[in-house]
Amino acid sequence: MGDENIKNKIVIFATAVIIVIMVLVSMGMKGDKPIEAACVLPLVRDVIDTVTLRGTVIEQGRDTVYPNGASRILSVYVKVGDKVARGQTLMRLETVDDRETLSEGVYRDAERSLEEFAQSEDPAGAVASFAAAAAALQPGEPEVYDVKSPINGVVMSLGGSAGDVISGLLPCAAVSDLSKLAVRAQVAENKISQLFVGMPCRVTCEPLCGDTTFSGSVTEITPFAKQTGFLTQDKTIKTDVMISLAYPPATLRPGYSAQARLVVDRHEDALLVPYSAVGQDEEGEYLFAVRGGKAVKVPVQTGLELDKWIEITGDMIQGELIVADVLSVTEGVRVTARVNP
């Protein structure tokens, strides 16, 4: 009976040993089995970081002509859009000599200024200034005189038609040299530090030029910022930027919308990997390189972005395989690389 118990114990012990050995062997085999992982070769590209500004084409070469005080327009010899030469007569006027006619001109010019008053940063102040200037006007001695163009250019506005009375507070004509155009744009406060006067850019006007671009440069950055979006929830702080255009196309006109692209940073021969290849833990950013058939954790720093790829710097060797999805492997695991095209 005792011998039989001993034999049973030996059998049980032997069975247990065999099971343990099988489990250990199984675990060892499982641990040695490599994981198939999608891998990529880092791209080598020149990467640029840009800021895109949207704005409006404006005139830089506008000259305005004022009448000699309150006057009645006798004749107008041009129309808006006409090309004129310097010294060419635009209209003939006669100064008014009575207060009733003067008041007529003030009232008319006030109506012309309503939109300008409304768009002013201080509408009430603009109205008050106009009223004060109007109150100081005095009728003059009757005099017939001609208004001439101060420059070669295009007539952009006229103060009225024959028979109208103008106060003298507003221009009676404006002429622009349309070879001198600029783009007035706005830049967000988090981007303004990247811009500087003299910075070159490329400008497009899609409705007009399609993919055609022309050159420009930053000529002015206002020394203050202002809040936009007063009537919406999307309130932002922006700064005005002026971009002068070099040789703008003849079809470009003030008031058109335009887009300027400025290069603020450039990295040559940068290493790029997919976004999904980069992970982050308490030690910082990292990726897995395939070295010696294993996933090796490599600390990296990320930089500029390009489409679905991101620039990396660190202990990398150009041309070595990178695991495309950082979550698909763990450090030290054996890897069978499946290189994606």
Image (cartoon, rainbow, N blue to C red):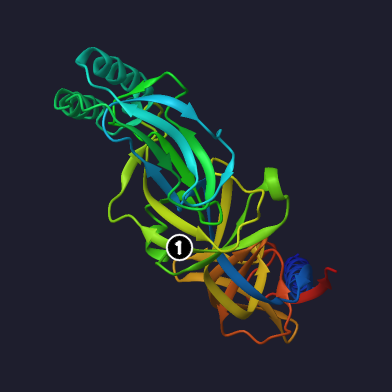
Q: Nearer the viewer, residue 159 or 297?
A: 159
Q: Position of residue 162 (x, y in %)?
A: 46, 22
Quadrant into which the N terminus falls: bottom right
Decide if residue 2 is on the left or right side of residue 81. Answer: right
**Res 119 seen here:** yes
Q: Position of residue 216 (x, y in %)?
A: 54, 63
- From this view, report whether residue 7 is shown above or below residue 206: below
- From this view, report whether residue 226 is shown above or below residue 13: above
Q: Nearer the viewer, residue 300 or 91?
A: 91
**Res 7 seen here:** no
Which SS class for mark 1? strand
Residue identifier under label 1: 218
Amino acid type assigned to the residue bearing label 1 in the image: Val
Number of numbered discs: 1
Circle 1 residues within 10 Å: few <14, some 14–19, many ≥20:
many
**Residue at screen point 67% across, 48% down:** 251
Decide if residue 279 is on the left or right side of residue 198. Answer: right
Q: Nearer the viewer, residue 250 or 207?
A: 250
- From this view, report whether residue 32 is shown above or below residue 152: below
Quadrant into which the C terminus falls: bottom right
Decide if residue 285 is on the left or right side of residue 159. Answer: right
In which image quadrant can residue 333 be found? bottom right
